[in-house]
Amino acid sequence: MRWENLTADPAGDPARDAALFGADAVTTRTFDTPEFRGITFHEIRARSIVNRVPGASRMPFEWTVNPYRGCTHACVYCFARKTHSYLDLDTGLGFDSQIVVKVNAPDLLRRQLASRRWHGEHIAMGTNVDCYQRAEGRYRLMPGIIAALRDHANPFSILTKGTLILRDLDLLRQASEVTDVGISVSVGFTDTELWRTVEPGTPAPERRLDVVRTLTEHGIGCGVLMAPVIPFLGDHPAQLRATVRAIAAAGATSVTPLVLHLRPGAREWFMAWLERHHPYLVRRYERLYAEGAYAPKWYQRRITRQVHELAQEYGIGPTRAGMPRRIAAPEPAAPEAVASEPTQLTLL
Protein backbone atom coordinates (compact mmCIF):
# COMPACT_ATOMS: atom_id res chain seq x y z
CA MET A 1 0.00 0.00 0.00
CA ARG A 2 1.18 3.47 -0.82
CA TRP A 3 0.93 5.17 2.58
CA GLU A 4 3.62 7.80 1.97
CA ASN A 5 1.94 9.82 -0.79
CA LEU A 6 -0.84 11.45 1.27
CA THR A 7 0.25 15.05 1.50
CA ALA A 8 -0.86 17.85 3.78
CA ASP A 9 -2.01 19.90 0.79
CA PRO A 10 -4.26 17.88 -1.55
CA ALA A 11 -3.42 20.28 -4.37
CA GLY A 12 0.28 20.31 -3.62
CA ASP A 13 3.25 18.46 -5.04
CA PRO A 14 3.52 14.98 -3.46
CA ALA A 15 7.24 14.93 -4.09
CA ARG A 16 7.71 18.15 -2.16
CA ASP A 17 5.19 18.04 0.69
CA ALA A 18 5.66 15.93 3.80
CA ALA A 19 3.52 12.80 4.01
CA LEU A 20 0.62 12.84 6.42
CA PHE A 21 1.80 9.57 7.94
CA GLY A 22 4.40 6.89 7.26
CA ALA A 23 4.19 3.13 6.87
CA ASP A 24 5.84 2.62 10.24
CA ALA A 25 2.82 4.37 11.86
CA VAL A 26 0.24 1.88 10.54
CA THR A 27 -1.34 -0.84 12.70
CA THR A 28 -3.74 -3.21 10.96
CA ARG A 29 -6.58 -4.80 12.95
CA THR A 30 -9.61 -6.99 12.38
CA PHE A 31 -12.41 -7.64 14.87
CA ASP A 32 -14.33 -10.91 14.96
CA THR A 33 -17.70 -9.39 15.75
CA PRO A 34 -20.79 -9.47 13.52
CA GLU A 35 -20.80 -5.73 12.82
CA PHE A 36 -17.12 -5.71 11.75
CA ARG A 37 -16.79 -9.11 10.09
CA GLY A 38 -14.90 -8.82 6.82
CA ILE A 39 -13.66 -5.31 7.63
CA THR A 40 -9.98 -4.41 8.10
CA PHE A 41 -8.97 -1.29 10.02
CA HIS A 42 -5.67 0.46 9.36
CA GLU A 43 -4.91 2.60 12.41
CA ILE A 44 -2.57 5.48 11.64
CA ARG A 45 -1.19 8.48 13.47
CA ALA A 46 -1.83 11.38 11.13
CA ARG A 47 0.51 14.36 10.88
CA SER A 48 -2.24 16.77 9.82
CA ILE A 49 -6.00 16.65 10.33
CA VAL A 50 -7.32 20.02 9.09
CA ASN A 51 -7.36 19.82 5.30
CA ARG A 52 -7.80 22.64 2.79
CA VAL A 53 -10.34 21.95 0.05
CA PRO A 54 -8.81 22.31 -3.43
CA GLY A 55 -9.63 25.64 -5.05
CA ALA A 56 -11.34 23.96 -8.03
CA SER A 57 -13.82 22.16 -5.77
CA ARG A 58 -17.54 23.00 -5.90
CA MET A 59 -17.76 22.67 -2.12
CA PRO A 60 -19.03 25.78 -0.25
CA PHE A 61 -16.37 25.50 2.45
CA GLU A 62 -12.58 25.70 2.62
CA TRP A 63 -11.53 23.41 5.49
CA THR A 64 -12.44 19.85 6.41
CA VAL A 65 -11.65 17.25 9.05
CA ASN A 66 -11.89 13.60 8.05
CA PRO A 67 -11.04 11.13 10.83
CA TYR A 68 -11.65 8.14 8.51
CA ARG A 69 -10.89 7.04 4.96
CA GLY A 70 -13.12 4.43 3.38
CA CYS A 71 -16.66 3.86 4.61
CA THR A 72 -18.70 0.86 5.71
CA HIS A 73 -21.88 2.58 4.55
CA ALA A 74 -20.96 1.02 1.18
CA CYS A 75 -23.03 3.50 -0.85
CA VAL A 76 -22.50 2.40 -4.44
CA TYR A 77 -22.46 6.00 -5.70
CA CYS A 78 -20.01 7.48 -3.15
CA PHE A 79 -17.79 10.05 -4.88
CA ALA A 80 -15.02 9.51 -2.30
CA ARG A 81 -14.21 6.05 -3.68
CA LYS A 82 -11.48 7.51 -5.86
CA THR A 83 -9.50 8.59 -2.78
CA HIS A 84 -8.81 4.93 -1.93
CA SER A 85 -6.79 4.58 -5.12
CA TYR A 86 -4.28 7.07 -3.68
CA LEU A 87 -3.36 4.33 -1.20
CA ASP A 88 -3.30 1.56 -3.83
CA LEU A 89 -6.54 0.27 -2.30
CA ASP A 90 -9.50 -0.94 -4.32
CA THR A 91 -12.21 1.66 -4.91
CA GLY A 92 -14.96 -0.96 -4.90
CA LEU A 93 -15.13 -3.56 -2.13
CA GLY A 94 -11.86 -2.22 -0.73
CA PHE A 95 -13.43 1.17 -0.09
CA ASP A 96 -16.25 -0.54 1.81
CA SER A 97 -14.03 -2.85 3.89
CA GLN A 98 -10.53 -1.32 4.20
CA ILE A 99 -10.99 1.56 6.64
CA VAL A 100 -8.21 3.97 7.56
CA VAL A 101 -8.62 5.33 11.10
CA LYS A 102 -6.72 8.45 12.21
CA VAL A 103 -6.55 7.45 15.85
CA ASN A 104 -4.86 10.67 16.99
CA ALA A 105 -7.38 12.97 15.28
CA PRO A 106 -8.84 14.59 18.45
CA ASP A 107 -5.46 15.47 20.00
CA LEU A 108 -4.05 16.63 16.69
CA LEU A 109 -7.06 18.85 16.02
CA ARG A 110 -6.82 20.43 19.46
CA ARG A 111 -3.18 21.33 18.82
CA GLN A 112 -3.94 22.75 15.38
CA LEU A 113 -6.83 24.86 16.67
CA ALA A 114 -4.51 26.32 19.31
CA SER A 115 -1.93 27.32 16.71
CA ARG A 116 -1.43 31.06 16.10
CA ARG A 117 -1.70 30.34 12.38
CA TRP A 118 -5.29 29.14 12.74
CA HIS A 119 -7.91 31.90 12.61
CA GLY A 120 -11.09 30.04 13.52
CA GLU A 121 -12.43 29.32 10.04
CA HIS A 122 -15.43 27.05 9.57
CA ILE A 123 -14.60 23.32 9.51
CA ALA A 124 -16.85 20.86 7.66
CA MET A 125 -17.02 17.17 8.58
CA GLY A 126 -18.65 14.21 6.86
CA THR A 127 -18.10 15.72 3.43
CA ASN A 128 -15.74 12.99 2.21
CA VAL A 129 -16.75 9.87 4.15
CA ASP A 130 -19.16 9.66 7.06
CA CYS A 131 -17.57 10.48 10.41
CA TYR A 132 -20.42 8.58 12.07
CA GLN A 133 -20.01 5.38 10.11
CA ARG A 134 -19.98 2.06 11.96
CA ALA A 135 -16.29 2.32 12.91
CA GLU A 136 -17.01 5.37 15.07
CA GLY A 137 -18.89 3.16 17.51
CA ARG A 138 -15.59 1.45 18.36
CA TYR A 139 -13.02 4.22 17.92
CA ARG A 140 -15.04 7.12 19.41
CA LEU A 141 -13.07 9.89 17.69
CA MET A 142 -15.91 12.38 17.31
CA PRO A 143 -16.45 13.23 21.00
CA GLY A 144 -12.86 14.45 21.27
CA ILE A 145 -13.13 16.32 17.96
CA ILE A 146 -16.36 18.10 18.94
CA ALA A 147 -14.96 18.91 22.39
CA ALA A 148 -11.88 20.52 20.82
CA LEU A 149 -14.05 22.62 18.50
CA ARG A 150 -16.30 23.58 21.43
CA ASP A 151 -13.39 24.61 23.64
CA HIS A 152 -12.03 26.87 20.88
CA ALA A 153 -15.50 28.14 19.89
CA ASN A 154 -14.66 27.12 16.33
CA PRO A 155 -17.64 26.99 13.94
CA PHE A 156 -18.25 23.65 12.30
CA SER A 157 -20.78 21.55 10.43
CA ILE A 158 -21.48 17.84 10.22
CA LEU A 159 -23.12 15.90 7.40
CA THR A 160 -24.06 12.31 8.21
CA LYS A 161 -26.22 9.31 7.42
CA GLY A 162 -25.38 7.82 10.82
CA THR A 163 -27.69 7.66 13.82
CA LEU A 164 -24.64 7.47 16.11
CA ILE A 165 -24.51 11.26 16.11
CA LEU A 166 -27.20 11.19 18.82
CA ARG A 167 -24.62 9.71 21.20
CA ASP A 168 -22.90 13.12 21.09
CA LEU A 169 -26.04 15.18 21.57
CA ASP A 170 -24.86 16.81 24.81
CA LEU A 171 -21.55 17.84 23.23
CA LEU A 172 -23.34 19.31 20.23
CA ARG A 173 -25.62 21.33 22.51
CA GLN A 174 -22.63 22.63 24.44
CA ALA A 175 -20.84 23.60 21.22
CA SER A 176 -23.94 25.34 19.85
CA GLU A 177 -23.95 27.61 22.91
CA VAL A 178 -20.57 29.10 22.00
CA THR A 179 -20.29 28.88 18.21
CA ASP A 180 -22.12 28.26 14.96
CA VAL A 181 -22.95 24.55 14.59
CA GLY A 182 -24.63 23.24 11.47
CA ILE A 183 -26.00 19.70 11.30
CA SER A 184 -27.35 18.07 8.16
CA VAL A 185 -28.59 14.54 7.62
CA SER A 186 -28.44 12.95 4.19
CA VAL A 187 -31.73 11.41 3.00
CA GLY A 188 -32.05 11.21 -0.76
CA PHE A 189 -35.18 9.07 -0.85
CA THR A 190 -37.48 7.03 1.37
CA ASP A 191 -37.91 4.05 -0.98
CA THR A 192 -37.01 1.01 1.13
CA GLU A 193 -36.06 -1.31 -1.72
CA LEU A 194 -33.82 1.29 -3.33
CA TRP A 195 -32.16 1.93 0.03
CA ARG A 196 -31.39 -1.75 0.63
CA THR A 197 -29.48 -2.09 -2.62
CA VAL A 198 -27.82 1.30 -3.10
CA GLU A 199 -26.93 2.17 0.54
CA PRO A 200 -26.64 -1.29 2.17
CA GLY A 201 -24.50 -0.26 5.15
CA THR A 202 -26.51 2.77 6.25
CA PRO A 203 -29.36 3.15 8.74
CA ALA A 204 -32.77 3.15 7.07
CA PRO A 205 -34.05 6.53 5.84
CA GLU A 206 -36.71 6.48 8.57
CA ARG A 207 -34.05 6.13 11.26
CA ARG A 208 -32.12 9.06 9.80
CA LEU A 209 -35.25 11.18 9.89
CA ASP A 210 -35.61 10.17 13.55
CA VAL A 211 -32.21 11.83 14.04
CA VAL A 212 -33.55 15.04 12.49
CA ARG A 213 -36.58 14.87 14.76
CA THR A 214 -34.53 14.26 17.92
CA LEU A 215 -32.03 17.02 17.22
CA THR A 216 -34.86 19.45 16.53
CA GLU A 217 -36.62 18.50 19.75
CA HIS A 218 -33.41 19.30 21.64
CA GLY A 219 -33.07 22.74 20.11
CA ILE A 220 -30.46 21.90 17.46
CA GLY A 221 -31.68 22.92 14.02
CA CYS A 222 -31.07 20.19 11.45
CA GLY A 223 -31.31 20.44 7.69
CA VAL A 224 -31.59 17.60 5.20
CA LEU A 225 -29.37 17.15 2.20
CA MET A 226 -31.69 15.32 -0.16
CA ALA A 227 -28.88 13.45 -1.82
CA PRO A 228 -28.53 11.83 -4.06
CA VAL A 229 -31.62 12.12 -6.18
CA ILE A 230 -31.03 9.09 -8.41
CA PRO A 231 -32.25 9.50 -12.00
CA PHE A 232 -34.99 7.10 -13.12
CA LEU A 233 -34.97 5.31 -9.75
CA GLY A 234 -35.71 8.03 -7.19
CA ASP A 235 -36.84 11.04 -9.21
CA HIS A 236 -40.49 10.26 -9.97
CA PRO A 237 -42.72 13.15 -8.80
CA ALA A 238 -44.50 10.83 -6.35
CA GLN A 239 -41.15 9.74 -4.89
CA LEU A 240 -39.95 13.31 -4.53
CA ARG A 241 -43.22 14.27 -2.84
CA ALA A 242 -43.06 11.35 -0.40
CA THR A 243 -39.47 12.19 0.55
CA VAL A 244 -40.05 15.92 1.05
CA ARG A 245 -43.22 15.20 3.03
CA ALA A 246 -41.29 12.87 5.37
CA ILE A 247 -38.49 15.43 5.73
CA ALA A 248 -40.99 18.13 6.66
CA ALA A 249 -42.72 15.84 9.16
CA ALA A 250 -39.36 15.26 10.87
CA GLY A 251 -38.99 19.00 11.49
CA ALA A 252 -36.07 19.73 9.17
CA THR A 253 -35.11 23.40 8.95
CA SER A 254 -34.24 23.12 5.26
CA VAL A 255 -34.02 20.66 2.38
CA THR A 256 -31.36 20.86 -0.31
CA PRO A 257 -31.60 18.50 -3.31
CA LEU A 258 -28.47 17.18 -4.99
CA VAL A 259 -28.64 15.06 -8.12
CA LEU A 260 -26.41 12.00 -8.35
CA HIS A 261 -22.95 12.73 -9.74
CA LEU A 262 -20.59 10.02 -10.94
CA ARG A 263 -16.92 10.85 -10.64
CA PRO A 264 -14.19 8.44 -11.74
CA GLY A 265 -13.93 5.60 -9.24
CA ALA A 266 -17.58 5.91 -8.25
CA ARG A 267 -18.82 5.85 -11.84
CA GLU A 268 -17.37 2.43 -12.63
CA TRP A 269 -18.68 0.90 -9.39
CA PHE A 270 -22.15 2.43 -9.79
CA MET A 271 -22.48 1.39 -13.43
CA ALA A 272 -21.53 -2.20 -12.53
CA TRP A 273 -24.25 -2.12 -9.86
CA LEU A 274 -26.72 -0.70 -12.39
CA GLU A 275 -25.89 -3.48 -14.85
CA ARG A 276 -26.68 -6.10 -12.20
CA HIS A 277 -29.83 -4.57 -10.75
CA HIS A 278 -31.32 -2.38 -13.51
CA PRO A 279 -29.68 -3.32 -16.83
CA TYR A 280 -32.45 -1.61 -18.82
CA LEU A 281 -31.21 1.74 -17.48
CA VAL A 282 -27.56 1.45 -18.53
CA ARG A 283 -27.99 3.11 -21.92
CA ARG A 284 -30.12 5.90 -20.43
CA TYR A 285 -27.38 6.63 -17.90
CA GLU A 286 -24.70 6.60 -20.56
CA ARG A 287 -26.66 9.24 -22.45
CA LEU A 288 -27.53 11.32 -19.36
CA TYR A 289 -23.91 11.39 -18.13
CA ALA A 290 -22.27 11.48 -21.54
CA GLU A 291 -20.69 14.88 -20.86
CA GLY A 292 -19.00 13.97 -17.59
CA ALA A 293 -19.62 13.38 -13.89
CA TYR A 294 -22.67 15.61 -13.56
CA ALA A 295 -26.17 15.31 -14.96
CA PRO A 296 -27.15 18.02 -17.47
CA LYS A 297 -28.03 21.42 -16.07
CA TRP A 298 -31.60 21.19 -17.33
CA TYR A 299 -32.13 18.01 -15.35
CA GLN A 300 -30.56 19.43 -12.18
CA ARG A 301 -32.70 22.57 -12.44
CA ARG A 302 -35.86 20.51 -12.90
CA ILE A 303 -35.21 18.45 -9.76
CA THR A 304 -34.26 21.54 -7.75
CA ARG A 305 -37.42 23.36 -8.81
CA GLN A 306 -39.65 20.41 -7.96
CA VAL A 307 -38.10 19.92 -4.52
CA HIS A 308 -38.22 23.62 -3.68
CA GLU A 309 -41.89 23.81 -4.67
CA LEU A 310 -42.65 20.80 -2.49
CA ALA A 311 -40.67 22.27 0.40
CA GLN A 312 -42.72 25.44 0.18
CA GLU A 313 -45.93 23.41 0.06
CA TYR A 314 -44.98 21.48 3.20
CA GLY A 315 -43.72 24.53 5.05
CA ILE A 316 -40.01 23.82 5.26
CA GLY A 317 -38.38 27.16 6.02
CA PRO A 318 -34.85 28.48 5.56
CA THR A 319 -32.07 27.56 7.95
CA ARG A 320 -31.65 30.06 10.77
CA ALA A 321 -28.18 31.56 11.04
CA GLY A 322 -26.13 30.43 14.01
CA MET A 323 -24.64 32.47 16.79
CA PRO A 324 -21.19 34.08 16.55
CA ARG A 325 -18.09 32.69 18.20
CA ARG A 326 -17.83 33.48 21.86
CA ILE A 327 -15.31 31.76 24.09
CA ALA A 328 -16.45 31.61 27.69
CA ALA A 329 -14.12 33.15 30.23
CA PRO A 330 -12.75 30.69 32.81
CA GLU A 331 -14.60 30.67 36.10
CA PRO A 332 -12.68 32.22 39.03
CA ALA A 333 -11.17 29.73 41.43
CA ALA A 334 -12.97 29.17 44.70
CA PRO A 335 -11.16 30.65 47.72
CA GLU A 336 -10.35 27.25 49.17
CA ALA A 337 -8.76 26.18 45.89
CA VAL A 338 -6.11 28.94 45.95
CA ALA A 339 -2.62 27.55 46.57
CA SER A 340 -1.10 28.43 49.95
CA GLU A 341 2.45 28.62 48.52
CA PRO A 342 3.86 30.91 45.80
CA THR A 343 3.27 29.72 42.24
CA GLN A 344 5.98 29.89 39.57
CA LEU A 345 4.59 31.66 36.49
CA THR A 346 5.49 30.49 32.99
CA LEU A 347 5.10 31.83 29.47
CA LEU A 348 4.47 28.35 28.07
Image (spheres, rainbow, N blue to C red):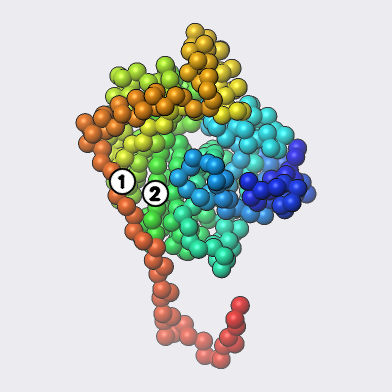
Please name whichever residue, 238 or 231, is drawn nearer the observer in this view of the structure: 231
The residue tagged 1 is 319
Residue located 53% across and 27% down the image = 293
* Real-space Cα separation, disc 2 to disc 1, in angstroms: 9 Å
On residue 182, the disc is: 2
Residue located 42% across and 35% down the image = 186
Residue 74, percent from left and from top: 55, 29
Quadrant assignment, res 96: top right
Residue located 60% across and 32% down the image = 81
Residue 342, percent from left and from top: 56, 91
Horizontally, residue 207 falls left or right of residue 265, namely left
Please name whichever residue, 139 or 200, is drawn nearer the observer in this view of the structure: 200
Q: Is residue 5 above or below residue 238?
A: below
Q: Decide: few, some or many residues near mark 1? Use Cα within 10 Å; few <14, some 14-19, many ≥20.
A: some
| Element marked by disc 1 | loop
Residue 63, percent from left and from top: 52, 51
On residue 308, the disc is: none
Whether residue 342 appears in this view of the structure is: yes
Horizontally, residue 241 falls left or right of residue 197, namely left
Q: Decide: few, some or many residues near mark 2? Use Cα within 10 Å; few <14, some 14-19, many ≥20.
A: many
